[in-house]
Amino acid sequence: MLVISDGVLPIPAKTLAHNVEPAVRGAWLEDEFLSPDTIDWPLNVVVVRSGGRTILVDAGLGADPDLHLPQAGRLIARLDAAGIDLASVTDVVLTHMHMDHIGGLLIDGVKERLRPDLRIHVEAAELKFWELPDFSRAVMPQGFPDALRKAAKKFVNDYRAQLRPFGEDVEVAPGVRAERTGGHTPGHSVVRLKSGGDRLTFAGDLVFQVGFDHPDWQNGFEHDPEESERVRIALMRELAATREPLVATHLSFPSICHVAVEGDHFRCVPAVWDY
């Protein structure tokens, strides 16, 4: 497994937690040496090889000129730098269809470099949601709702023939399984990796940096904040019990860590990473 950085996405710091008082949120940001106004959100993607298949888990942000995000959308260049030819990718697994997870495949010229028999695995409820997305419970920064709709619509139109919807879970390759969690979006999924006795979970957007200290703080991009809280806590309790490593999209690169339980919250314990 290889973790690839797609860069960083600057977002308003209040997006991390819209259900707490600004002073409380600000105190946490200060303790973490983060700006109270804007923070850089890491963007991580995973590449896995199994059973003769090369699997890309999520596809980064890509390039949306309307959002002016020059520090993001680095996935394709960094895959090239890592010696991973786009034509070798047999499968893409999407944790969900927010644009920072699909946008890399929408960059001009990328589709032409991909193999025609590419399989793109996405949970069926996720696909259904984006036919008429409801953001009524999300609290996103200005411009993002329209950008999300636009990216998802283009993605489905461009890759309809490659889409492989699944229900609840699917084994993509030996030791690579996607499992629906819901919460963050209706079909949000985690990806479970297994090789011999080793295990690892790619959590997508279930876990953010603040989620260890305050798993009940609600992120502005969550479709169902209460369900997100429930599945986030359940997943972290599970990983703390099994001692299985965690990787997540928006934890600091390379983001691999263990989860420890401390009372009613959690602690991120960085793991030794073999570069």
Image: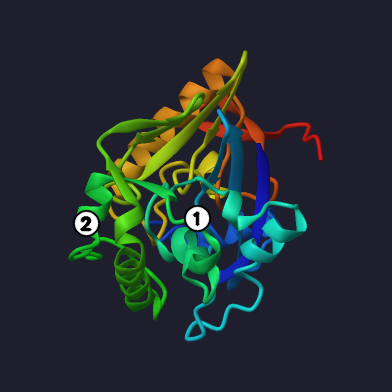
Residue 108: give x, y in percent of width and height: 52, 77
Q: Secondary structure at mark 2?
A: helix
Q: Does residue 150 lie above or below 249 as drawn?
A: below
What's under tag 1, amino acid-wise?
Answer: Arg
Residue 221: give x, y in percent of width and height: 38, 60
Asked if residue 135 lies left or right of residue 243, the reply is: left
Instruction: Sort mark 2 into few (<14), some (14-19) or many (20+) by Cα contacts within 10 Å.
Output: some
Using the rendered view, name the quadrant where residue 171 is placed: top left
Mark 2 lies on residue: 129
- For this orientation, the residue located farthest to the front is 116
Tell me, yes or no, if residue 138 can be seen here: yes
Residue 21: give x, y in percent of width and height: 43, 61
What's under tag 2, amino acid-wise?
Answer: Phe
Q: Residue at coordinates 22% horizontally, 47% vertically from top-left?
A: 125
Q: Does residue 234 lie above or below 128 as drawn?
A: above
Compare residues 164 and 64 and report the one nearer the observer.
164
Tell me, yes or no, if residue 7 can be seen here: no
Using the rendered view, name the quadrant where residue 72 is placed: bottom right
Q: Residue at coordinates 51% horizontally, 68% vertically from top-left?
A: 112
Compare residues 122 and 257 and report the one nearer the observer.
122
Compare residues 8 and 81 and report the one nearer the observer.
81
Q: Does residue 166 lie above or below 240 as drawn?
A: below
Q: Secondary structure at mark 1?
A: loop
Instruction: Sort mark 1 into few (<14), some (14-19) or many (20+) by Cα contacts within 10 Å.
Output: some
- For this orientation, the residue located farthest to the top is 197
- For this orientation, the residue located farthest to the right is 275
